[in-house]
């Protein structure tokens, strides 16, 4: 029997190892779902991509749909983790909105597989999920999407109050901003040799365009 101290010292390592394996499964699943779509992706494909057995995948996720929705939620988590500090940061509404847009654009580029699967989830919601559990999970994810839009809407409203952003229809403005950035799942693909500085430059350019528009004003 191992000493009590040795037993306690092993627990964090085991927890970290479990979390790491789960993250590896999510990454492999996101890449497979992105390439093949939900229907054509199998647990076998995901296991092969990460060099593991499908038993390991099933140990963490009992069904493919559970894994699919976990990928979507992880992608949403990444968006919240990047945008919330920017939304709550210093400066007026316009400065914080710029920071949010840049952070979201960078997240889209650095987690493109997860965000592409997120789009597939929206399509599944539009066409109807096949089981009550899937519908419940999609409802949960839709609530999280609405909360993300509300986060940006609050920044817009703050900017309208401090005079740094022109007042307007907040709901439609949020959808226009996110629609432009989320479209990156269609046209952006990481390339070998890409550096973060290059992605940051793209994010700044997109934020500038969305904030300033393209029409020259007198």
Image (cartoon, grey):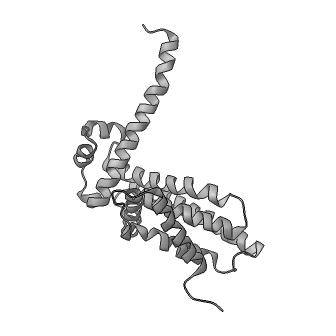
Q: Residue 196: where, in percent of width, then height?
A: 47, 57
| Residue 37 falls left or right of residue 166 | left
Residue 154, visible in the rendered structure: no
Q: Residue 183: where, in percent of width, then height?
A: 43, 71
Near-viewer residue (218 or 161): 218
In the orientation shown, which residue stands out farthest toward the right? Answer: 162
| Residue 10 falls left or right of residue 208 | left
Q: Residue 1: where, in percent of width, then height?
A: 42, 7
Residue at (66, 92) in percent of width and height: 218
Figure quadrant of residue 13: top left
Residue 157, visible in the rendered structure: yes
In the orientation shown, which residue stands out farthest toward the bottom? Answer: 218
Figure quadrant of residue 185: bottom left
Near-viewer residue (203 or 163): 203
Near-viewer residue (210 or 197): 197
Relative height, residue 125 to residue 5 (above, below): below
Residue at (53, 58) in percent of width and height: 144
Q: How many labels does the image show?
A: 0
Residue at (43, 37) in percent of width and height: 19
Relative height, residue 45 to residue 13 (above, below): below
| Residue 167 falls left or right of residue 117 | right
Relative height, residue 22 to residue 183 (above, below): above
Q: Residue 49: where, in percent of width, then height?
A: 26, 46
Residue at (60, 74) in percent of width and height: 171
């Amino acid at each position: 029997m191992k000493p009590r101290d040795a037993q306690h010292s092993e627990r964090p390592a085991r927890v970290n190892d479990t979390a790491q394996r789960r993250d590896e499964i999510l990454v492999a699943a996101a890449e497979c779902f992105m390439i093949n779509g939900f229907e054509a992706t199998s647990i076998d494909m995901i296991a092969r991509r990460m060099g593991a057995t499908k038993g390991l995948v099933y140990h963490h996720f009992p069904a493919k749909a559970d894994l699919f929705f976990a990928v979507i939620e992880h992608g949403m988590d990444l968006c919240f983790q990047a945008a919330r500090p920017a939304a709550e940061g210093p400066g007026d509404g316009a400065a914080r909105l710029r920071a949010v847009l840049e952070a979201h654009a960078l997240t889209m580029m650095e987690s493109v597989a997860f965000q592409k699967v997120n789009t597939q989830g929206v399509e599944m919601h539009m066409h109807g999920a096949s089981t009550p559990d899937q519908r419940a999970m999609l409802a949960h994810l839709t609530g999280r999407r609405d909360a993300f839009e509300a986060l940006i809407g609050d920044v817009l409203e703050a900017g309208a109050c401090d005079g740094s952003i022109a007042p307007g229809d907040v709901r439609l403005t949020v959808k226009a901003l996110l629609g432009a950035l989320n479209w990156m799942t269609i046209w952006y693909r990481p390339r070998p040799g890409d550096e973060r500085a290059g992605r940051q430059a793209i994010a700044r350019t997109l934020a500038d365009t969305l904030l300033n528009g393209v029409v020259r004003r007198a």
